[in-house]
Amino acid sequence: MTIRLRRLRTTARMREAVAETHVAPQSLVQPHFVMDGDGADVPIESMPGVARMSIPSLVDRVKSDHASGVANVLLFGVTEKKDEQASAATDPDGLIPRAVRALRDALGDDVLLMTDVCLCGATSHGHCGVLSDGVVQNDETLALLAEASYAHARAGADVVAPSDMMDLRVSAIRDRLDEEGYINTAILSYSTKFASAFYGPFRDAASSSPQHGDRKSYQMDPRNRREALRESLLDEEEGADMLMVKPALSYLDVIADIAEAALAPVAAYNVSGEYSMVKAAAERGWVDEGRLVSEILTSITRAGADLIISYHTRDAVEKGWLG
Ligand code: PBG
């Protein structure tokens, strides 16, 4: 009688050879928080290992990360200059354009520069769009997002990543970039972005918490899987070069759906709260950080993500926590 084994009859080397999923370091993106001035790094308490950095410190950091194999970065600007119209976000000499120029000068084309485009870090009220009578105004916000994207593109960003979730922003940004001649600047749309408690530590890091209300009117309901797919497919139609699901871990089903239905590459954002949970448990010795990170990155890749934005990137690449 033949007994059929249901697992593969393999050695460790064979298992490595036939594994269905590999996390590629070239598909990982390290996010950075850039601040005004040239002061010392300001560690973010709720995100151990992550700090707000001045532009000179950022350049040093990106250079040394690059030397160890991290080639992609996503930049967030953290500014104290806030007003109703988010003018710091659209300033052609604002924080992000200056950081992009400094990185380009230092590293040339060796690094893929992606910039977050949103108004929430620069509005006095902390919402992702301009307000009128306390309500976010979708259409008035579009021109400002297009202006901010143009400022980033002109400074040399490879990819602009709008994270605001206003309707029709992808086409507004695409039109503006094309008009200005930036036809090769790509748009990575935060196309399926859930209203999530996992962004808590990020809002500390970026000083971008809404002063009143929440983001549920423009971010997505975590209960809706079909709506999640629809949002991303609409952005693909509008001209997004890449789509994104955010957060990642509670939404692997959504990543898989979009990867299946869309033709554009799919990114996943392994967000601040997901990172902080791992760090907090690891600090207490409750989990094996390396194995956990490797398993997390593997599962996001297995679900179908082509690109992963994660605060674990540097450690994963340097320590080989790739799975
Ligand atoms: C800004 C933005 C947020 C994140 C990225 N861009 C926060 C939010 O929407 O509240 C979250 C990233 C993270 O938690 O790591 N709109």
Image: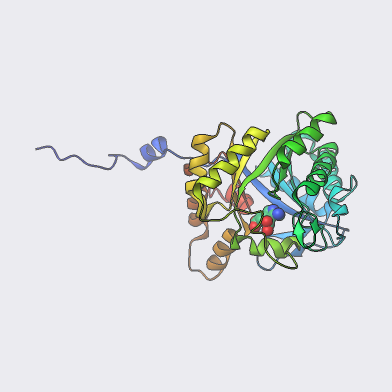
Residue 72 % position (x, y): 68, 42
Give the residue at the far front of this rendering: 133
Residue sitting nearer the eye, 155 or 182: 182
Q: Position of residue 224 (x, y in %)?
A: 51, 52
Q: Where, by quadrant of the figure, is residue 147 drawn?
A: top right
Q: Is residue 242 left or right of residue 113?
A: left
**Does the rendering let one see residue 296?**
yes
Residue 298 on image: x %, y %: 49, 46
User: Considering depth in this image, is 30 or 169 the residue closer to the camera?
Assistant: 169
- Ligand 1's image quarter is bottom right
What is the number of callouts on the image? Answer: 0
On the question of residue 48 being in view, the answer is no
Question: Which residue occupies the extreme left position in the image?
Answer: 1
Return the residue found at the far bottom.
284
The colour scheme is rainbow
Whether residue 98 is situated above or below residue 205 in the rendered picture: above
Q: Residue at x 57, y 67 (%)?
A: 280
Quadrant for the N terminus in the image: top left
- Residue 168 occupies which quadrant of the picture? top right
Query: At 84% from the left edge and 55% from the top edge, which residue is drawn?
Result: 86
In the image, 322: left or right of 4? right
From the viewer's perspective, is residue 121 above or below residue 110?
Answer: below
Q: Nearer the viewer, residue 82 or 2?
A: 82
Q: Residue at x 59, y 43 (%)?
A: 231
Q: Could you tell me residue 234's position as x and y percent? A: 61, 38
